[in-house]
Amino acid sequence: MTAPTRLGPSTATASTPTAPPRSVLSLARLWWIYAIIPASLLAVAVDRTVLGGHLAETLPRSPDSFLLLALVFGTPHIVASNLILFTTPEYLRFYRRRLVVISLTLLVAVVTAGLLLPRDVVFALIAGWTVTHVVKQQIGIGNISARLSGPWFRLWAVCGIASGIVFYNAIFLSHRLTGPWAGAVRGTVAVLTAVVALVTLVLVTRVERPLGRRWVWGNGGVMVFAGLLFLAGYPFFAILIPRFVHDLTAFAFYVNHDVNRSRAGLSSWLLRPFDRLPLGAVLALPLIAIGISALLERPADAWFNAVLRGLTGHEISRPVSLGIVGFLGLLHYAFESFTWKDPSPYRRHVGIGLS
């Protein structure tokens, strides 16, 4: 009887499939997106000391007025988020019931609000949800290393969200805020910004990890300086700072997710053709999202109205850029409140490093 053959280390290793290396999203490197804060403050300082306030007088109220910025920030990350959901059968199966319920709820809510409420009120409600989504995303990611909780942390979040909601609506609904209302808005933003600044100082002392403290400084800086720039008469930068931070953070998670799915051979049907290209998993989703956003922001309205005009003789104001993008945005806010949290199927493909 022959003795059983022993498997040495080399034999065992050769017979065991090797898992592909996992891409890790470094929170330390991602933190550098907050450099938009000193960059914006430098632009304001130059404007005040050298340009005589030219930027304050000529810049639009929002980065959306510049086509290039509008096609990089805002709509593209919303489109990318929805592409991940709708082009990945695994996610559609897992979330199909929630998708149906949330979609129907949003449609009923939007139609009902549009029929019963003034347009500016509807805008204010959606703006409130937008700001809440932006602030909670950044605080949640920062808290991966900061590990904060308790009343001070909640006060920080609530005051930051409230300040953002007030000045965001003040920027886009300035025609409604005249006389004493304008003064009340500025006073409210000033008080809330001061509270956020003080609470930031408190929270920093309660975080053990240096990286966690850096994220508290970064998120506190976004909330404080966005408010201060609004008060200083630079609404463009007050909107640009949180949008820049929020959108690039979102794309960093999306790309890390796509790279890890690609390495595991699980790319969605949309991204699979790009797997063999250099940096295909890194660039494909952002570029596709920007391309779709360009179509939705510009020619899609004209195409839709050309068909509608031929059929009915009538047109609708911005049917695609407002209707479709608006709905995708609300769906994005709803789904991203849970899809990227453990133990969702999304998070299985995201590697996060605290260095």
Image: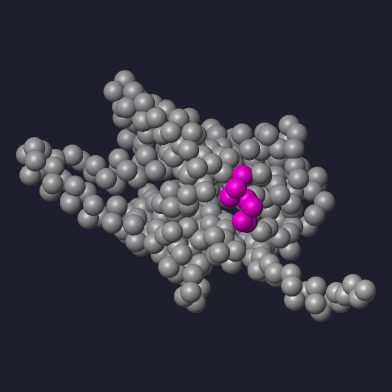
Residue 148 in the figure: left or right of residue 264: right
Report the number of numbered marks: 0
Q: What residue do we see at 52% from left, 48% from top?
A: 90
Which residue occupies the foreground of this view, 7 or 282?
7
Note whether 173 is above or below 21 in the view shown: above
Which residue occupies the foreground of this view, 242 or 142?
142
Q: Is residue 165 visible?
A: no
Color theme of the render: one colour
- Considering every residue shown, the one lying at the far front of the view is 1
- Which quadrant of the view contains residue 323? top left
> Can you give x and y, in whole percent of width and height, for residue 19 in the image?
68, 67
- Considering every residue shown, the one lying at the far top of the view is 116
Q: What residue do we see at 79% from left, 48% from top?
A: 207
> Can you give x and y, in whole percent of width and height, for residue 242 in the image?
52, 50
Q: Is residue 162 visible?
A: yes
* Magenta stretch: includes residue 347: yes
> Can you give x and y, in whole percent of width and height, for residue 342 in the image?
66, 44
Q: What residue do we see at 38% from left, 26% from top?
A: 109
Report the magenta residues as a range: 344-350
* Magenta stretch: includes residue 311: no
Residue 137 in the figure: left or right of residue 203: left
Q: Quadrant of the C terminus?
A: bottom right
> Can you give x and y, in whole percent of width and height, for residue 209 in the image?
80, 54
- Which quadrant of the view contains residue 118? top left
Q: What residue do we see at 36% from left, 53% from top?
A: 64
Residue 132 in the figure: left or right of residue 304: right
Q: Quadrant of the N terminus?
A: bottom right
